[in-house]
């Protein structure tokens, strides 16, 4: 049994910018590393080796539901109870609740249904590129990577696309650790977002449309299968998960290509490598740093580590995807990498529901970005780019480019 060397300090600004050397050290020393986050009292265990991360995500001993925790453990990890009405979704649930919630929307995200969105996604991408200033200088996140997925998911759900700036602000607050323990912005965000969703769902209930929110309301009325909180939480989850991640897949992918001009040139010369290039972006700089949390309900032995009861664990997805035991030359960005069994979309029953949609959005985006912006390059020294401070998200704050 190894003793935890930690806590490993994962949340300093240097590590946020480049977490990979620390992840490499963690993987050498242990499969499950003890860390801590400044906004939480309890430790966070990061499952950092590939096989351990896959095993962890598939292991029913690790609970998703906070109800599995004692009041004391809940207090050590969660201080904002006002989020609870937005938290009754599939990603916070264990079976059988998880199965019920996921099956209600799974149909809308199958490969076939998603493929039907290709013309609309392509049209939105063209429109955004049409609006770029000629010979321009833009923040590619603001001008393209953010509006594309938020428009797609908003249209799918039926929520007004015009409100996208509010969604972005709320989501950023939701995903950014509180500064100096100040929870007021998080509480305000929860109240505003909740009021917004309540109002939106009331309008859809009165006047159903051809969208996913109306379909979920109909399912609720027929079988009484969703409570109002579950419905609100579902829209919240899809709206947040449906854009924040894809934004950063596009942003990080552009960053990786510009950092590796040889690979960018190779992709321009061999467009057939596009799908494999997107998989390599997911592996090398995927938008999700760590999975969402799971909890031990009793003392648990796992990959040589003893984890007491009532503790929080996450899978270190970026770390697992650089595990040299699985990926030869893991620190190399190789758009032709085969095989590439990365776990950027997670694993097990919570495997990303939106993966087909995210892949389609990314493939359309990179095809058009390469076609339409032939001279794309960084507008600033890439060493000055800042990465967002977040437990979950791996993404740039801004991505200024010229073309
Ligand atoms: C779950 C990644 C895009 C919806 C997940 C998980 C990961 C992930 C890692 C599992 C989290 C965990 O087990 O703790 C990504 C990445 C994306 C992306 C890397 C883009 C590149 C999307 C999109 C949607 C979406 C576009 C839109 C619907 C979901 C949902 C879940 C989920 C609903 C929860 C599934 C469940 O609990 O059964 N995603 N995601 N994701 N994702 Fe995505």
Image (cartoon, rainbow, N blue to C red):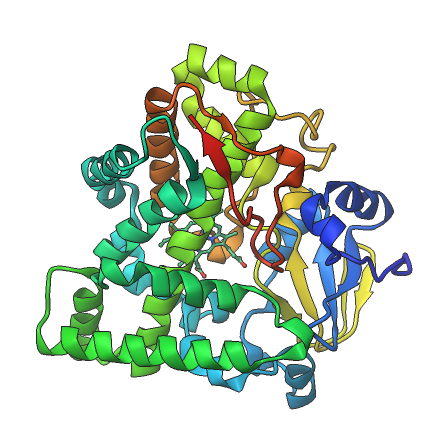
Q: Quadrant of residue 86?
A: bottom left
Taking the spot 37% from the left edge, 73% from the top edge, the residue there is 233
Viewed as shown, does residue 27 lie left or right of 290? right
Viewed as shown, does residue 60 lie left or right of 226? right
In terms of depth relative to the viewer, which is nearer, 163 or 249?
A: 163
Report the number of numbered marks. Answer: 0
Q: Quadrant of residue 272?
A: top left
Viewed as shown, does residue 279 lie left or right of 217? right
Taking the spot 29% from the left edge, 41% from the top edge, the residue there is 111
Q: Position of residue 156 (x, y in %)?
A: 23, 55
Q: Quadrant of the C terminus?
A: top left
Q: Position of residue 333 (x, y in %)?
A: 62, 26
In terms of depth relative to the viewer, which is nearer, 250 or 350?
A: 250
Q: Position of residue 345 (x, y in %)?
A: 50, 47
Viewed as shown, does residue 235 lie left or right of 186? left
Q: On screen, 95 above or below 337? A: below
**Residue located farthest toward the bottom when viewing the structure as drawn:** 71
Taking the spot 24% from the left edge, 58% from the top edge, the residue there is 161
Q: Quadrant of the N terminus?
A: bottom right
Q: On screen, 388 above or below 99? A: above
In terms of depth relative to the viewer, which is nearer, 103 or 246?
A: 246
**Residue located farthest toward the top when viewing the structure as drawn:** 269
The reply to whether residue 26 is visible in this rendering is yes
Q: On screen, 270 above or below 325? A: above
Taking the spot 80% from the left edge, 58% from the top edge, the residue there is 9
In terms of depth relative to the viewer, which is nearer, 298 or 284?
A: 284
The reply to whether residue 226 is visible in this rendering is no
């Amino acid at each position: 049994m190894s003793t935890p060397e930690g806590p490993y300090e994962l949340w300093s600004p240097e590590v946020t910018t480049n977490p990979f050397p620390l992840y490499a050290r963690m993987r050498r020393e242990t499969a499950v590393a003890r860390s801590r986050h400044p906004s939480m009292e309890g430790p966070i265990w990061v499952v950092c080796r590939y096989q351990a991360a896959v095993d962890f995500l598939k292991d029913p001993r690790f609970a998703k539901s906070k109800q599995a925790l004692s009041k004391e453990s809940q207090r050590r990890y969660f201080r904002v109870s006002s989020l609870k009405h937005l938290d009754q979704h599939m990603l916070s649930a264990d079976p059988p609740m998880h199965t019920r919630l996921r099956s209600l929307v799974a149909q809308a995200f199958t490969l076939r249904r998603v493929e039907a969105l290709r013309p609309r996604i392509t049209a939105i991408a063209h429109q955004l590129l049409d609006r770029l200033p000629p010979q321009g200088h833009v923040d590619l996140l603001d001008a393209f990577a953010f509006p594309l997925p938020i428009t797609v998911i908003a249209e799918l759900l039926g929520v007004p696309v015009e409100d996208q700036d509010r969604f972005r602000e709320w989501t950023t607050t939701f995903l950014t650790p509180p500064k100096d323990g100040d929870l007021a912005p998080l509480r305000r965000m929860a109240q505003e977002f909740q009021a917004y969703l309540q109002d939106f769902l009331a309008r859809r209930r009165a006047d159903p449309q051809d969208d996913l929110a109306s379909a979920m309301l109909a399912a609720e009325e027929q079988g009484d299968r969703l409570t109002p909180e579950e419905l609100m939480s579902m829209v919240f989850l899809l709206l947040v998960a449906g854009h924040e991640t894809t934004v950063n897949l596009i942003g990080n992918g552009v960053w990786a290509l510009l950092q590796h001009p040889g690979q960018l040139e190779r992709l321009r010369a061999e467009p057939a490598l596009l799908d494999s290039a997107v998989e390599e972006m997911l592996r090398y700089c995927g938008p999700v740093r760590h999975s969402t949390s799971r909890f031990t309900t009793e003392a648990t032995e796992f990959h040589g580590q003893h984890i007491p009861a009532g503790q929080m664990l996450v899978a270190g997805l970026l770390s697992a995807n650089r595990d040299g035991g699985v990926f030869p030359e893991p620190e190399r960005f190789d758009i032709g990498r085969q095989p590439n069994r990365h776990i950027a979309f997670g694993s097990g029953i919570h495997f990303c529901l939106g993966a087909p949609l995210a892949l389609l959005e990314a493939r359309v985006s990179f095809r058009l970005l390469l076609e339409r912006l032939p001279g794309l390059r960084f507008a600033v020294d890439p060493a000055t780019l800042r990465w967002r401070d977040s437990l979950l998200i791996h993404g740039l704050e801004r991505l200024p480019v010229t073309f």
